[in-house]
Image: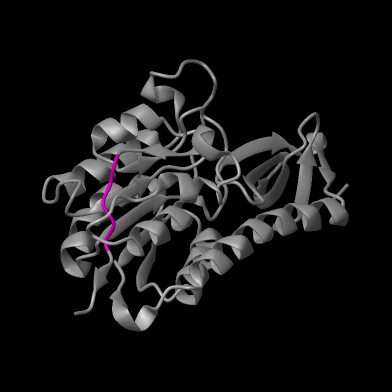
Amino acid sequence: MDFKVNDYVLIKNDDKIYQIEAIEKNIAYLKGLTYRFQTTSLISELTVAPTHLVEKAIKKVNEIIDRFKISSKSRDKHQMIYGTILHIDGDKEYLNSCMDLYKEMNIFANGIYLKESEIKDKIEELVLMLTPDIVVITGHDLYNGKGFKELSNYRNTKHFMDAVRMIRKHFNSESITIIVGACGSNFEALIASGANFSSSPKRINIHTYDPAVIAIKVATTSINQTVDFGQVLKYIENKKDAFGGIETKGKMKVLL
């Protein structure tokens, strides 16, 4: 069977839906349809994902986000100044989806596409120039299952850690809230590096919007209140297995 870039596929003995990013000879480079991870597969191991399964997966994510939007519509935006967001993403499509969500929720955000390995070299300049209240650092990651603690077992966790540390050279965890990670990232290492919220405590997959949902909650919580992470988890499918964090104040200011 002939496959092409952007086709939705299944891998043999794997029920997750993937999208083809590139094809080289008999190898397909894949990313999750709604999850933030990448992998490769032999073309011979692929089958076309049935349309009804693709639609079901997209519908499931959209239903969660729609509930999140409804829960946040009651805010009186005329009396509040929300925290600002810098969202750096290793996936252009996911970045665009998150930027659309920020816009709909009336949250000011700058979105930057950078490969995960490039973020640490650009982040310091971007943060100093844009002065965000909240920084999201995400894209793709992958844990190979060979040992939780060894950083070499993660595709991009080390890159994320380096980026967090660059921010913490200038700003502590109360000055800038950092939300970082992707599918299977080393949660403990990222928190130890200075993140406020991170994936993935159980080394499982996270959805496209998970980092953005947390960022919006921080942006719309008062600077005098601790972010209600329990409320956030209502809109993250895999709950505390996917994301965790530390006690963090919000970034919203009330006009007097």
Q: Is residue 219 left or right of residue 143?
A: left
Q: Is residue 62 visible?
A: yes
Image: 191 above or below 113 = above
Predominant SS of the magenta segment? loop
Identify the residue shown where x is 42% and y is 76%.
Answer: 106
Seen from the viewer's position, the closer of residues 30 and 99 is: 99
- Give, as a single range, the part of the protein colored magenta: 247-251
Residue 185 within the segment the image draws in magenta: no
Q: What is the quadrant of residue 81 in the picture? A: bottom left
Say how many tags the image has.
0
Q: Residue furthest bottom?
A: 78
Image: 18 above or below 148 = below
Seen from the viewer's position, the closer of residues 24 and 205 is: 205
Image: 18 above or below 42 = below
Give x and y (percent) for residue 243: 46, 39
Q: What is the quadrant of residue 136 in the picture? A: bottom left
Q: Is residue 116 left or right of residue 206?
A: left
Seen from the viewer's position, the closer of residues 25 and 33 is: 33
Quarter placement of the C terminus: bottom left
Q: Residue furthest left?
A: 170
Identify the residue shown where x is 37% and y is 45%.
Answer: 180
Q: Is residue 113 visible?
A: no
Residue 248 within the segment the image draws in magenta: yes
Identify the residue shown where x is 17% and y is 54%.
Answer: 175
Give x and y (percent) for residue 56: 79, 54
Identify the residue shown where x is 47% and y is 56%.
Answer: 213
